[in-house]
Image (cartoon, rainbow, N blue to C red):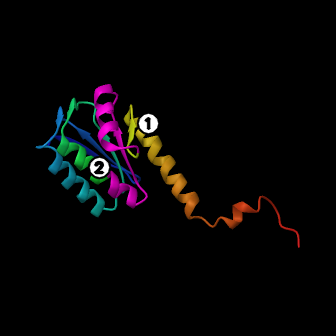
């Protein structure tokens, strides 16, 4: 699998350099993502701009990685503006895939997801009161 990877504190960005995301790419993609999970990354952005076709093995790999990201309160973002690929992913991947047109929007989605997770994990009592409490 041909790719480049950029690691950030919040996410890992995989820029694919493959036109077919199928049988030959899927196992390598999954192995790469498993390595990222071991390193502590739960947010993965995949730049799929060069990808033109998506095979069944690619769909399975994407679904597995998405499920793992979700279980860690992370996000898998697929960045593509290829309408045929988006339609394929929508049909095969279900409603829980995050597909955005650009990597920049993917970065924004990751930060929004992190904020939501932070708010969920904080003590809600402080925010539920809405002001000072009189005795």
Residue at horizontal 37%, vertical 36%? 103
Query: Disc 2 on helix, strand or loop?
Result: helix
96 with respect to 21 (left or right): right
* Residue assigned mark 1: 105
Name of the residue lying farthest toward the right? 135
Q: Is residue 30 above or below residue 122?
A: above
Q: Quadrant of residue 135?
A: bottom right
Residue at horizontal 32%, vertical 43%? 93
68 or 32, which is in the foreground?
68
Question: Gap between marks 2 and 1, in whole Å?
Answer: 21 Å
Decide whether residue 70 is among the magenta residues: yes
Q: What is the magenta range?
A: 66-95
2 or 23, which is in the foreground?
23
92 or 65, which is in the foreground?
92
Q: Is residue 57 above or below residue 20?
A: below
Name of the residue lying farthest toward the bottom? 135
Task: Return the x and y of residue 131 as percentages of the image width and height.
Answer: 80, 60
Residue at horizontal 39%, vertical 54%? 9
* Residue assigned mark 2: 63
Task: Return the x and y of residue 106 as percentages of the image width and height.
Answer: 41, 40
Name of the residue lying farthest toward the top? 83
């Amino acid at each position: 699998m041909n790719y480049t990877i950029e690691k950030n504190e919040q996410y890992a960005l995989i820029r694919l350099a493959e036109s077919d995301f199928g049988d030959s790419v899927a196992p390598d993609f999954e192995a790469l993502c498993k390595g990222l999970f071991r390193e502590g990354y739960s947010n993965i952005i995949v730049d799929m701009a060069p990808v033109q076709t998506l095979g069944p093995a690619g769909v399975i790999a994407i679904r597995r990685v998405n499920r793992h990201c979700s279980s860690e309160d992370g996000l898998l973002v697929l960045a593509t503006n290829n309408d045929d690929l988006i339609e394929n992913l929508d049909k095969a991947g279900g409603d829980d895939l995050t597909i955005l047109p650009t990597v920049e929007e993917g970065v924004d989605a990751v930060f929004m997801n992190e904020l939501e997770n932070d708010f969920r994990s904080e003590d809600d009592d402080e925010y539920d009161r809405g002001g000072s409490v009189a005795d």
